[in-house]
Image (cartoon, helix red, strand yellow):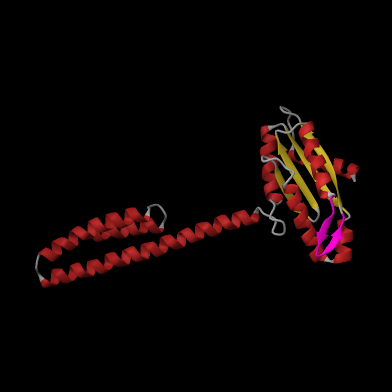
Amino acid sequence: LAVGLVMSLTAGTCARTLRYWICATLSTMALGTLMVMLLISGEPVKIGIALLFGLYLWSVYESSKHIVSQVEALLIAERELDAAARRDPLTGLPNRREFNDAMTAATAEGGFALLALDLDGFKGVNDRFGHAAGDELLRQVAERLSGVVRKADTLVRLGGDEFSIVLPGADVADAKAVADRAVATVSMPYIVLGAPVFVGVSCGVEVIAAGATADVEAVKEAADRALYVAK
C-alpha cells in the first residue's frame, strides 16, 4: 500500500496535478514509517528491504525534482514563445496580433481612437543607405513614438514603415494631442549609421465616441482612409 501510494503521488507530480513538496512529504511519511518498522524488526532480510525502500524513496525525490524542473522550463518557454509571437522582432513593439487584441478590447469598452501612421520618405532612406539603415531608422522611430503615447495606449508596428496607436477612452482632443506629438517628434532629424536622415510621418485618425457601437474592421478602414487623405 505504501509503495502504491508513493507511485500514485509521483504520477500526480508528473501530471502537474500535485505539487512536488506535497509528493515528497507524503512519500516520506508513507515509506518512512514502513522503513522504520522493517529496521526495528532486527531481521537481516527486512533490514535489506528497508534499505532498498530508502533507495527507492531517494529515486522518487530525484526523478520528481527532474520532472518538475522540466515542466517549469517548458512552461517558461511557452510563455516566452507567446510573448515573442506578440512582439515585432525589429523594434520590440507589439505586433499585429497584439494590435487586434487591443482593438477588440477597445471596441468592447467603447470610446476610443485609432491613429494610423505611415512614414514619409522612408523608401528613399532604404534606397540610399541600404536596409541596415532602414532598420535602424525604424528602431529610432519606434523609440520616439513610445515617448509620445499615454500609459494606457497601445503602440504597434504593423509592418514595413506602418505604425498604429490604439487610444482607449480618448476623445477628439486626446487623439489630436497624441497625433500632433507623434508628427512633431518623428519629423525631427535622425542620425543613422553616422549620416543625417530626415523623414516625416502622415497620420490618419478615427475617433469613436463613448457609447457608440463600432466594428473593428470598419474602424481600421476609416483610419486608413484618413491616412490616405493626410498623405
User: Is 123 situated above or below 55?
Assistant: above
**Highlighted magenta segment, given as a residue range:** 188-198
User: Is 3 situated above or below 157?
Assistant: below
Decide which of 218, 144 is in the foreground and name it. 144
Confirm whether residue 1 shows in the render. no
Confirm whether residue 166 shows in the render. yes
Q: Residue furthest left?
A: 42
Q: How many marks?
A: 0
Decide which of 77, 53 is in the foreground and name it. 77
- x and y percent of residue 54 in the render? 24, 67
- x and y percent of residue 26 in the render? 28, 54
As drawn, is 50 to the left or to the right of 165? left
Which residue is drawn at the image coordinates 69% and 37% (left, top)?
Answer: 106
Which residue is drawn at the image coordinates 11% and 64% (left, top)?
Answer: 40
- x and y percent of residue 163 in the render? 78, 49
Q: Is residue 174 magenta?
A: no
As drawn, is 25 to the left or to the right of 221? left
- x and y percent of residue 28 in the render? 26, 58
The quadrant holding residue 81 is bottom right
Which residue is drawn at the image coordinates 19% and 58% (left, top)?
Answer: 33
Decide which of 196, 40 is in the foreground and name it. 196
As drawn, is 201 to the left or to the right of 211? right
Decide which of 15, 142 is in the foreground and name it. 142
The quadrant of the image that shows the N terminus is: bottom left
As drawn, is 110 to the left or to the right of 223? left
Q: Is residue 192 magenta?
A: yes
